Amino acid sequence: METTVSSPVKLTASAVSELKRLMGEASHDATQHLRIGVKGGGCSGLSYVLGFDNQEADDEFFEIEGIPVVMKNAHGIYLFGMEVDYSDGLNARGFVFKNPNASSSCGCGSSFAV
């Protein structure tokens, strides 16, 4: 069953551009969606999940700027209001997570505590 909800997270223009570039590569499996989520671990307790994956039965589905996105319903409490950006600078290159729900985060920005 597919459920469509308003997006709990925001993708910046640079993140959308990079994700669409990745989706345009020959190696991209067009049947997969962008998965945004969390998992236990990292130096602050929880780590972000961002990658392409198959939709599962307990996923929420939404679309951001033409990008199909899935997220576990239970992860919304940790990610609601989060912004995903993409940095292409000399000092840092990659996806950056700006999470208003995080009480603290690690120096690398890939894990957080609530």
Image (cartoon, rainbow, N blue to C red):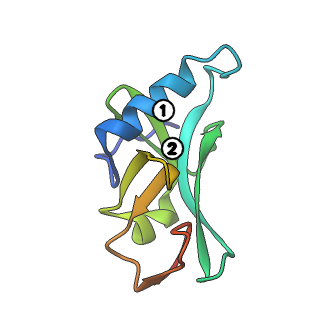
Q: Quadrant of residue 34?
A: top right
The picture places residue 26, in percent across and down from the top left corner, at 67, 13
The picture places residue 29, in percent across and down from the top left corner, at 67, 22
Under mark 2, the amino acid is: Val
User: On screen, 49 above or below 61?
Assistant: below
Frontmost residue, 28 versus 74:
28
Q: Is residue 30 left or right of residue 61?
A: right
Name which residue lies at 61% across and 19% down: 30
Instruction: Calculate the distance from the C-alpha at mark 1 to the C-alpha at mark 2.
Output: 14 Å
Name which residue lies at 53% across and 37% down: 1
Q: If the image is split into quadrants, where does the C terminus sit?
A: bottom left
Which residue carries the number 2 mark? 70
The picture places residue 27, in percent across and down from the top left corner, at 71, 19
Under mark 1, the amino acid is: Leu
The picture places residue 45, in percent across and down from the top left corner, at 61, 82
Q: Which element carries disc 1, helix, strand or loop?
A: helix
User: On screen, 66 above or below 74?
Assistant: above
Q: Is residue 28 left or right of residue 13?
A: right
Check whether the beta carbons of the residues at disc 1 and disc 2 lie within 8 A of each other: no
Q: Which element carries disc 2, helix, strand or loop?
A: strand
User: On screen, 96 above or below 51?
Assistant: below
Q: Earlier in the sequence, mark 1 or mark 2?
A: 1
Name which residue lies at 40% across and 40% down: 15
Name which residue lies at 66% across and 36% down: 54
Q: Is residue 78 left or right of residue 65?
A: right
The circle on residue 95 is none
User: On screen, 46 above or below 22?
Assistant: below
Crowding around mark 2 (Cα neighbors within 10 Å: few <14, some 14 to 19, many 20+) is many
Crowding around mark 1 (Cα neighbors within 10 Å: few <14, some 14 to 19, many 20+) is some
Q: Nearer the viewer, mark 1 or mark 2?
A: 1
Residue farthest to the top, as pictured: 26
The circle on residue 19 is 1
